């Protein structure tokens, strides 16, 4: 199935609302996703509203839409909250290409995303998710659609000039629990005190208030805080670089080869037609410095 022209996809991506909540199957009744989606007429997408501009919910979604100059009605999750962001738009484009309604299922914790997928609560995860070898033991990943990376934020007045210096000083380093940022900090900053917090907002708040000496965070997250004016303390990226390259991808259940192939083809078709890049252009304030 070929993705429709960019202008049509973008309109649908911005305006598609959530379908009425459907009852997920039990783990024992799960089968191939493509025929199941066609039969129910609904694409169910799992998301965690924690990484803007990929997924935002509630008041954050309203603010994101305003900053991105989106004027079409927002989508809504099954819990009634408005949702917005690049992944929300890609999900809406996928639902349109499939000829079905979109149902967005928000989870309370980032760590709940993959278990919910495996248990059949939704058909795919689209949520700024980094594909890793460890996660690939549980789920299958699509082709990547975005590259970012981790940076280490420190105050401009810091005495730490390098990553080894930060570790040697037993510095307090904030990370979001359960993410690649936590894995990186624990593996790379031996000797530092790693402070695992529940959200990126909590991580940024801790470094902004001076409660920690550094924060390991995705570049796009720190860029989002800049765009929204949420940082007050002067901060800088340690060594003025990113320490990792991370590829965001969609996640599906293992063994669901046809569904995975469809998603890969959708991404390729969207990029070839220009629809993907036209959609991403909405988020230039966040993406323009991506490297």
Image (cartoon, grey):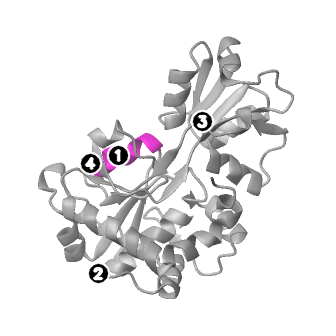
Task: Give the mark, 2 or 3, whose residue is nearer the N terminus.
Answer: 2
**Depth order, front residue of 280/76:** 280
Q: Which residue is label 1 attached to?
A: 114
Residue 163: % across, % down = 66, 24
Q: Main secondary structure of the magenta part?
A: helix
Callout 4: 10 Å neighbours few (<14), some, many (20+)? some
Q: Which is in the foreground here, disc 3 or disc 4?
A: 3
Determine contact: label 2, label 3, CB under 8 Å: no
Q: Measure how far apart labels 3 and 1 are at the Cα level.
A: 25 Å
Q: Point out which mark residue 118 bears.
A: 4
Residue 124: % across, % down = 33, 59
Q: Is 3 displayed left or right of 137 in the figure?
A: right
Q: Which is in the foreground here, disc 2 or disc 3?
A: 3
Report the span colored magenta.
109-117
**Residue shown at 67%/59% (left/top)?**
286
Q: Which residue is label 2 attached to?
A: 1
What element does badge 1 sit on? helix
Q: Which is in the foreground here, disc 3 or disc 1?
A: 3
Callout 3: 10 Å neighbours few (<14), some, many (20+)? some
Q: Is 229 displayed left or right of 101 in the figure?
A: right
Q: Which is in the foreground here, disc 4 or disc 2?
A: 2
Task: Give the mark, 4 or 2, whose residue is nearer the N terminus.
Answer: 2
Residue 186: % across, % down = 52, 22
Determine contact: label 2, label 1, CB under 8 Å: no
What element does badge 4 sit on? helix
**Residue shown at 35%/46% (left/top)?**
114
**Residue shown at 33%/66% (left/top)?**
263
| Quarter of the view holding residue 173 | top right
């Amino acid at each position: 199935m070929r993705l429709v022209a960019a202008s049509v996809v973008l309109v649908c991506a911005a305006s598609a609302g959530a379908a009425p909540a459907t009852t997920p199957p039990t783990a024992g009744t799960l089968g191939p996703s493509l025929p199941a989606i066609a039969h129910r007429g609904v694409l169910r997408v799992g998301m965690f509203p924690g990484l803007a501009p990929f997924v935002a919910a509630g008041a954050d979604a309203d603010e994101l839409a305003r900053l991105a100059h989106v004027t079409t009605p927002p989508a809504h999750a099954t819990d009634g909250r408005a949702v917005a962001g690049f992944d929300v738009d890609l999900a809406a484009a996928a639902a349109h290409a499939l000829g079905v309604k979109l149902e967005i299922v928000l989870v309370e914790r980032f760590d709940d995303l993959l278990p919910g997928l495996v248990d059949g609560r939704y058909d795919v995860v689209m949520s700024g998710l980094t594909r890793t070898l460890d996660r690939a033991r549980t789920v299958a990943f699509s082709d990547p659609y975005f590259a970012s990376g981790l940076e280490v934020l420190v105050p401009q007045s810091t005495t730490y000039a390098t990553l080894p210096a930060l570790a040697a000083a037993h510095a307090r380093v904030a990370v979001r629990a359960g993410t690649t940022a936590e894995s990186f900090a624990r593996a790379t900053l031996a000797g530092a005190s790693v402070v695992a917090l529940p959200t990126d907002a909590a991580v940024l708040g801790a470094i902004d208030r001076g409660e920690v000496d550094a924060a390991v965070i995705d570049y796009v997250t720190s860029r989002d805080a800049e765009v929204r004016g949420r940082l007050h303390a002067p901060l800088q990226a340690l060594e003025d670089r990113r320490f990792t390259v991370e590829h965001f991808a969609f996640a599906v259940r293992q063994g669901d080869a046809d569904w995975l192939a469809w998603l890969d083809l959708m991404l390729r078709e969207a990029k070839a037609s220009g629809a993907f890049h036209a959609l991403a252009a909405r988020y230039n304030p966040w993406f323009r410095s991506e490297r």
